[in-house]
Image (cartoon, helix red, strand yellow):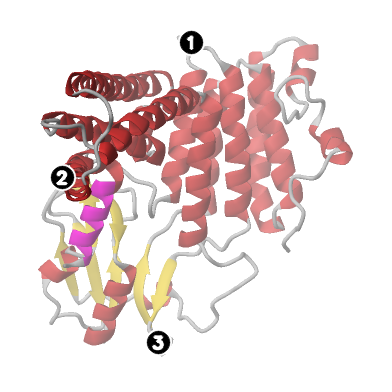
Amino acid sequence: MSWLARYRFKLYVLNSIWIFPSLSIILALLTVALLGRIDRALGWELNISEDTARTVMGTVAASMFTLVVVGSSAILLVVQLASAQLTPRIITLVYRNKIRKLSLSFFVFTFTFAVGALVRIEGGTPLLTSYLAAYGFLINLALFIYFIDSIGKTVRPSSVVRIVALAGREVIHNVYPLQLKIQQASAPKSSEVLKDVPRRIVLNEIDGVVLAFDLKGLVSLAERSNCVIELVPEVGDFVAAGDPLFRFFGGGEDLSGDSLRKSVALGSERTLEQDPMFAFRIIVDIASKALSPAINDPTTAVLAIDQIHHLLRDVGCRSLAEGRETDSKGQLRLVYRTANWEDFVYLAVTEIRHYGRDSIQIMRRLRAMLENLIDTLPARRAPLLRQELHLLELSAKRMFPDVDDQTLAQTGDLQGMGGGDSESHLVNHEPLVHVRLE
């Protein structure tokens, strides 16, 4: 199986909620058949009448079917509410939740098991089968209560932005593994390698967004052909049929286009696996929608800025140089594009500053974030942050003609409103950053 096939299969399983419940049907049928044989072989029977057993099993089956319907409806309702109130880009995260997948699987398993046990009640009531159906129903009832509690908490903006931020932090560490002070002195600069005219260009054949690529596989292909491969689009970019996908320097004529295209996964929408910018995009969309006149919920936007603050700090501590991969001998083999510091800052700040320009709460929280990042990140990150701080001051002066309001808006506050200025907060409480990188 190729890397592309494995990736698509893994992504489909990860984003699908029907697979495990469907497999639980088969498992339930096998289990009820096995327990039925054990009961018959050992002669174990429950000391109740067949009519009573059928009534109990029928009740269990009907109740479990109701739980399946209610649980499915609740998930669809969460999808609708989350996409309308937060952003449609988190729908995938709703289907990825393990609790929902396991809950539906247990509900479907118990329903199928109860139906299978019901049809086997003849000439006696099987002991193990009846016990498993009855106690399984009680366990599923408790699980259903937990399921409802969990799904109700899912639609909270604080939970959503936290989940996205945790996923974003993980992909940031994967895409940018080196701290800012660490340099790859042994690797040649990609700008020097790419000055020559490319020997060959491989074009894309289908439309889609670049979801991920096989880094190790491309390095292996480049080493085998003794060339340097450049992946033209960045993860998260949309590429149309006929757009350049790969460029080759120093060789690569013997590599087939199909094998190269199978090293890049394209899809209809972006995913978080290799796209750190997408985590920022989701959180910024949540903040932007919260700041829209129709919703007007700046506190939700502040919750989003809380997570953006920590993600920006994490990004700012890492080396964001253009992606370069070498072979076992240290020879450059693969060049790919990644987002730089300007990309992250502009995405994280610009839209929220624009949509929240008339909210003192947003102005204060953005200022607290920028001031803290200037103080805690390496000096090379500061100029762009100071530029954003200047733009924030200009917005405050334009939007608030009253001098007192301008003063209030130009005071940093980690809570937006009510948390005091950022400097006193950092002095009186545990600092946000414990180690400063130089």
In this rendering, the answer to whether 174 lies above or below 429 is below
**Distance between mark 2 and mark 3 Cα atoms:** 55 Å
Q: Quadrant of residue 215?
A: bottom left
The residue lying at 18 percent from left, 24 percent from top is 50
Which one is nearer the viewer's eye here, 353 or 148?
148
Mark 3 vs mark 1: which is more N-terminal?
A: 1
Q: What type is the residue that disc 3 sits on?
A: Ser
Residue placed under numbered mark 1 in the picture: 293
Image quadrant occupied by the N terminus: bottom left
- Name the front one of labels 1 and 2: 2
Which one is nearer the viewer's eye here, 306 or 6?
6
In this rendering, the answer to whether 37 lies above or below 76 is below
Q: Secondary structure at mark 3?
A: loop
Q: Residues within 10 Å of mark 1 (few under 14, many from 20)?
A: few
Q: x%, y% of residue 423?
A: 84, 36
Residue placed under numbered mark 2 in the picture: 33
Tell me, yes or no, whether the two marked residues, 2 and 3, touch with CB atoms within 8 Å: no
Q: What type is the residue that disc 2 sits on?
A: Ala
Q: Secondary structure at mark 2?
A: helix
Does residue 213 show up magenta in the picture? no
Mark 1 vs mark 2: which is more N-terminal?
A: 2
Q: x%, y% of residue 113?
A: 21, 35
**Distance between mark 3 and mark 1 Cα atoms:** 56 Å
Q: State the extent of the magenta-drawn residues as a range.
A: 3-13
Q: x%, y% of residue 76?
A: 30, 22
In this rendering, the answer to whether 258 lies above or below 103 is below
Q: What type is the residue that disc 1 sits on?
A: Pro
Q: Secondary structure at mark 1?
A: loop
